[in-house]
Amino acid sequence: AHRQPKSFEATQTFRPHHIITMSPDIQIPDGHQAQQWSWDLPDQHGNPNVVLKELRESIQQHVDGFIRNLKD
């Protein structure tokens, strides 16, 4: 809850361990040594039928899986 997403420009001042994008269409600039993750989430802006609750649950599942992978 205390961590906030950062722009790629902001990551030039520190070296993140992981970069997570919420769409496979997002291009990560060259030069980042972080492990990169791309979560293919439903696009709520392009599809008004996507319920925010479903989007939130999808993000939660991805976060839970990400944390499990870090522990392994």
Image: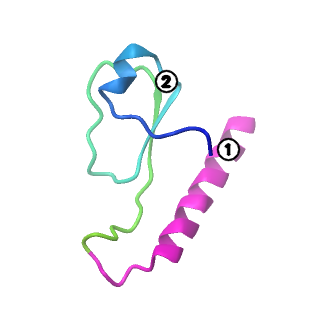
Between 22 and 4, the residue placed more toward the observer is 4
Viewer can see residue 49:
yes
Gap in angstroms between the C-alphas marked 1 and 2 = 16 Å
State the residue at coordinates (28%, 77%): 47
Q: Which residue is mark 1?
A: 67
State the residue at coordinates (44%, 80%): 51
Q: In which quadrant of the rendered view does residue 70 lie?
A: top right
Left or right side of 72 for 41: left
Looking at the rendered structure, the secondary structure element under dot 2 is loop
- Quick one: label 1 or label 2, which is nearer the N terminus? 2
Would you place residue 54 above or below residue 58 in this image? Answer: below
Q: Position of residue 8 (x, y in %)?
A: 32, 30
Label drawn at residue 56: none
State the residue at coordinates (28%, 69%): 45
Q: Which residue is mark 2?
A: 16
Instruction: Look at the image and tell me in which quarter the C terminus lies.
Output: top right
Q: Position of residue 12 (x, y in %)?
A: 35, 18
